[in-house]
Amino acid sequence: MKFAIDRYRPLQTNLTDSTPLIIDTQANPQDILEAALQRIRASSDLLRTLHCQSFLDGDIEDIPHITHALYLLTQDGCDLLKVAQQRMLNWKAPV
C-alpha cells in the first residue's frame, strides 16, 4: 500500500518550506487535465495580449510581474499535465 504522501504531489511553484499547493494524484484525470488546460490557456491568453501590446506605453516595472505570472501559470499547468499523463497511461477501460 502506498503512503498518503504519494497521493499528494507539491507544485514546483511552491516557494515556501511547507507545500501549501498540491495536486491530488488520485483526483479524476479529466479534472486534473481541465485544471492544467485552464492555466495553460490563461498563460497563452496573456502572451497573446503581450504580443499585441506596444511596450512604448508600458512600465518597465511591469515586466517582472508579467513574467512571474506567466511562470506560475505555465509551470502549474505543466505539473498538472504530467500527473494527468501518468494517470491516463495507467488508465484501464471499464469492462
Image (spheres, rainbow, N blue to C red):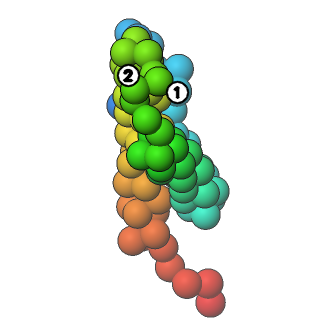
- Residue to which mark 2 is pinned: 63
Q: Residue at x 38, y 22 (%)?
A: 63
Rendered view: 49 above or below 57: below
Q: Nearer the viewer, residue 56 or 68?
A: 56
Q: Which residue is drawn at 40% across and 29% down?
A: 55
Give the amino acid at mark 2.
Ile
Give residue 60's position: percent from left, percent from top.
37, 15
Q: On the image, which quarter does residue 16 sit in? A: top left
Give residue 24's position: percent from left, percent from top.
55, 43
Q: Residue at x 43, y 55 (%)?
A: 81
Q: Give the number of marks.
A: 2
Q: First in sequence: mark 2 or mark 1?
A: 1
Q: Which residue lies furthest to the front in this view?
A: 56
Q: Which of 45 and 74 is in front in this view?
A: 45
Element marked by disc 1: loop
Left or right position of 37 against 62? right
